[in-house]
Image: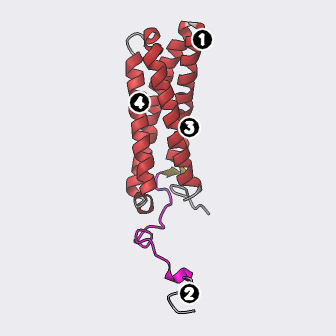
Amino acid sequence: MTEEQTPQCDEDRLIDPIAEAPGYQQTETRIAVNGHPIHAMSVAFPVALSFCLLGADVLFWWTGDAFWARAALWAAGTGFLFGMLAAFSGTAELLLVRGIRARAAAWTHAIIAVTLLSVLGANWGHRLYGYEAAVLPYGILLSALGAAMVAFTGWHGGKLVFDYHLGTSKGN
């Protein structure tokens, strides 16, 4: 076999220039309480409230009970406000930790999450003046879009944490 025909060794493979950048391996959280990442703790509320919003809309559609339309209004508003809090900690994490900032997947997650916040805010604003009339058809459609986006951005964010260990605390 000639040199051109030999299989490549691990040393001969291409190296990702971004992975060689200083600070690429620095992925530990900077926004934490006793080592617990605030962003990871705070996203649970907007995620749950987004699915509750869709559930309340479906129940209003099914039963016609105004309670569910009012519950959807509160879920939309509270989900949006808690989402803003989660966004502040996530943005701080993205901008302060070099290893997170260097990865395209982290920016993709951030863009999807901001788009989700826009949908939640629009859904809440749509309901503020007449929450019963707002459910059908646009409220429930916005809720379904929001739930789908929560699933997508949540899966993507989970992948960042569990596969790449971004924003975690190394601990003792």
Q: Is 171 in front, or is 119?
A: 119
**Residue 93 coordinates in the image, percent (x, y):** 43, 52
Left or right: where 46 falls relative to 63? left
**Residue 47 coordinates in the image, percent (x, y):** 54, 34
Secondary-structure class at tag 3: helix
Q: Is 51 in front, or is 14?
A: 14
Residue at mark 1 to residue at mark 4: CA–CA distance: 23 Å
Q: Which one is earlier in the sequence, the residue at label 3 or at label 4?
A: 3
Q: Amino acid at mark 3?
A: Ala
**Residue 22 coordinates in the image, percent (x, y):** 40, 71
Secondary-structure class at tag 1: helix
Q: Which one is earlier in the sequence, the residue at label 3 or at label 1?
A: 3
Give the residue number, with chain letter if any, for mark 2: 6
Q: Which one is earlier in the sequence, the residue at label 1 or at label 4?
A: 1
Secondary-structure class at tag 4: helix
Q: Residue at x 52, y 29 (%)?
A: 50
Give the residue number, with chain letter if any, for mark 1: 62
Give the residue number, with chain letter if any, for mark 3: 44
Q: Work out whether 126 lies above or below 3.
A: above
Question: Marks 2 and 3: which is nearer the front?
Answer: 2
Residue at mark 3 to residue at mark 1: CA–CA distance: 27 Å
Residue at mark 2 to residue at mark 4: CA–CA distance: 54 Å
What predominant SS class does the magenta segment belong to? loop
Q: Quadrant of residue 96?
A: bottom left
Q: Amino acid at mark 1?
A: Trp
Q: Amino acid at mark 4?
A: Val
Question: Marks 1 and 2: which is nearer the front?
Answer: 2
Q: Which mark is residue 119?
A: 4
Q: Specify start and end residues of the magenta stretch as a single range.
A: 8-31
Secondary-structure class at tag 2: loop
Q: Work out whether 141 lies above or below 106.
A: above
Mark 3 crowd level (few <14, some 14–19, many ≥20, 10 Å Cα):
some
